[in-house]
């Protein structure tokens, strides 16, 4: 196992997934790709009806940088084998596409992400989509 993909969103679930991915990476001397996805689907406008796309884009990029910085700090002892990436688009398809196109051997994900109002007994919708749409092994961390 050479490359592990760990999508993060700043949630407690992705923090746990990062810890588990770190353990696996240490055991197998694997590299880790920490991926944060900016998922903007609904255009937002100000009161005058003018799009705030530039403001939203700047805000989400700063938020993504903060999430990735925190994740990198969490696994700081693996720095030479860690890459951080921010991509934009629909979350599940981006995870699937990145993993497929970059020869990822394992995807480690939290069972739920931010904003999930789903009871803890159920799996999050993004994680569920990735599990069912990829041929790459997925480890789900509760």
Image: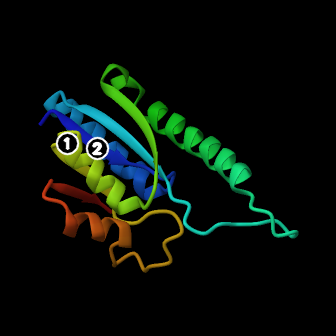
Residue, disc 2: 5
Label 1: few (<14), some or many (≥20) within 10 Å? many
Evaluate if marks 2 and 1 touch, with contact meaning CB atoms under 8 Å apart.
yes
Location of residue 35 with respect to 44 vertically, above or below: above
Instruction: Report the side of 81 relative to 12 (left or right).
Output: left
Element assignment for label 1? loop
The structure residue drawn at horizontal position 33% and vertical position 19%, both measured from the top left corner, is 80
Residue that extends furthest to the right in the rendered view of this protein: 48
Split into 4 quadrants, where in the image is the N terminus?
Answer: top left
Q: Which residue is mark 1?
A: 104
Q: What residue is drawn where x is 29% and y is 37%?
A: 22
Residue 121, picture quadrant: bottom left
Q: Position of residue 69 (x, y in %)?
A: 53, 34
Q: Residue at x 22, y 34 (%)?
A: 25
Outermost top residue: 80
Residue at image position (37%, 30%) is 83
Would you say 103 lies left or right of 64 here? Answer: left
Whole-percent x and y of residue 123? 33, 73
Would you identify the image quadrant in which residue 58 lies? top right
> Measured along the vertical axis of the image, is residue 2 above or below residue 117?
above
Q: Position of residue 76 (x, y in %)?
A: 42, 26
Query: Depth check: 39 or 115 in front?
Result: 39
Q: How many numbered markers are drawn?
A: 2
Q: Earlier in the sequence, mark 2 or mark 1?
A: 2
Element type at mark 2: strand
């Amino acid at each position: 196992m050479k490359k592990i993909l760990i999508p993060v969103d700043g949630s407690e679930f992705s923090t746990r997934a990062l810890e588990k991915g770190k353990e696996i990476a240490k055991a197998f001397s694997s590299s880790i790709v920490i991926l944060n996805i900016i998922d903007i689907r609904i255009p937002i406008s100000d009161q005058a009806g003018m799009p705030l796309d530039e403001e939203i884009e700047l805000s989400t990029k700063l938020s993504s940088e903060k999430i990735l910085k925190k994740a990198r700090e969490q696994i700081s002892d693996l720095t030479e084998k860690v890459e951080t990436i921010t991509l934009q688009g629909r979350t599940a398809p981006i995870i699937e596409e990145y993993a497929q196109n970059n020869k990822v051997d394992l995807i480690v994900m939290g069972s739920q992400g931010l904003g999930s109002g789903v009871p803890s007994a159920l799996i999050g919708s993004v994680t569920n989509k990735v599990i069912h749409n990829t041929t790459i092994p997925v480890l789900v961390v509760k």
